[in-house]
Amino acid sequence: MEFCLKRIIHITALCAVILLFIACKEKEIERNNSKIKVAVSGYLPYTLAKSIFADTAEIQMLMPPAAGVHSFEPSPKNALQIKNADFFFYISDRIEPWAKSLSDGVGTIGIALAYNLPDINPKDPHYWMSFQNAAAMAGNMAFITSEKFPQLKPVILGNADRFENEMQLLDKLYKQLLSNCKTRDIYHIGHNAFGYIARKYNLNFQPLNGSLSESEPAAAQMANMIKEIKDKKTDYIFSEKIINPKLASVIAAESGAKILNLYAVEDITKEEFEKETSYTQFMMMNLENLVKGLACN
Ligand SMILES: [Zn+2]
């Protein structure tokens, strides 16, 4: 009898645990179902989406870290990721020429974020390196999704406002902290992604790699840069971790200058992706290194 009672108590407890488990599972499924599904081409739209949607969206990034935004080619798996999403966000048809036909092909709304931007230089497709443009691109993302999901409108538009404030603050800090520097010459062993910052804050970028991250610098160009760094007794050169760090090390060793990193946010290392370093954080790291490297006070 005692055994039977024990057994019933045991079975009841077990049933309670199972019921609780099922209830929890259902809740989890319900929560997942209420999330927007967003696919993004690469890290720039990814970090904007994180800022705008926070945890109201499931975000799939097509381009893995360190894949190279200027040379990326999508796979059938990427087409499926876009197909399963409510929206697919990418930077522009110029940066990702494959994006529109891929999203059209699977019937998902594909949106190039670079439209109605306030600060456009037709020669430079790195639009997001202007803080005004970054705010507008995040605003475009927020506006389009909040139209389709009105229940999330307050959260999404509130986050877009906060992001815009952050961009205004970055602009103020850049103006202030880069106003009085020993030099405005930047020897950049990377690619030509910083034109918007250069123009806005009056800096003289000298990139070694041309406009595409994958192009190789000519030997003569390299030798000239090393000579100039030595002649001007420049303390720091700048580099992009993701692009040819060995080349920067060679130039640093030859010229005696030290290396500081700059980030174009279009592509990132695996470690940076795991840390989910945000656009604003990358831009603060850029500012810190520029202030140090150009000896601003
Ligand atoms: Zn680029």
Image (spheres, rainbow, N blue to C red):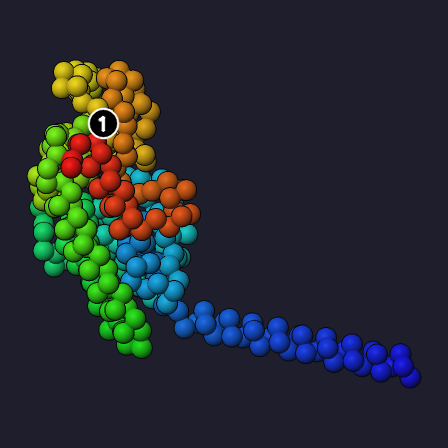
Amino acid marked by disc 1: Ile
Q: Quadrant of residue 200?
A: top left
Q: Secondary structure at mark 1?
A: strand
Using the image, determine if residue 129 lies above or below residue 108. Answer: above
The image position of residue 24, as x and y in percent, is: 56, 73
Horizontally, residue 9 falls left or right of residue 63, namely right
- Viewer-proximal residue, 214 or 34? 34
Q: Quadrant of the N terminus?
A: bottom right
Q: Quadrant of residue 84?
A: bottom left
Using the image, determine if residue 63 lies above or below residue 256. Answer: below
The image position of residue 167, as x and y in percent, is: 19, 55
Neighbor class of circle 1 (other Cα within 10 Å; few <14, some 14-19, many 20+) is many
Numbered circles on residues, count: 1
Q: Is residue 215 visible?
A: no
Look at 17% across and 32% down and name the residue there. Answer: 294
- Viewer-proximal residue, 238 or 139? 238
Look at 12% across and 56% down and name the residue there. Answer: 117
Name the residue furthest right: 1
Q: Residue under circle 1?
A: 237
The image position of residue 265, as x and y in percent, is: 27, 45
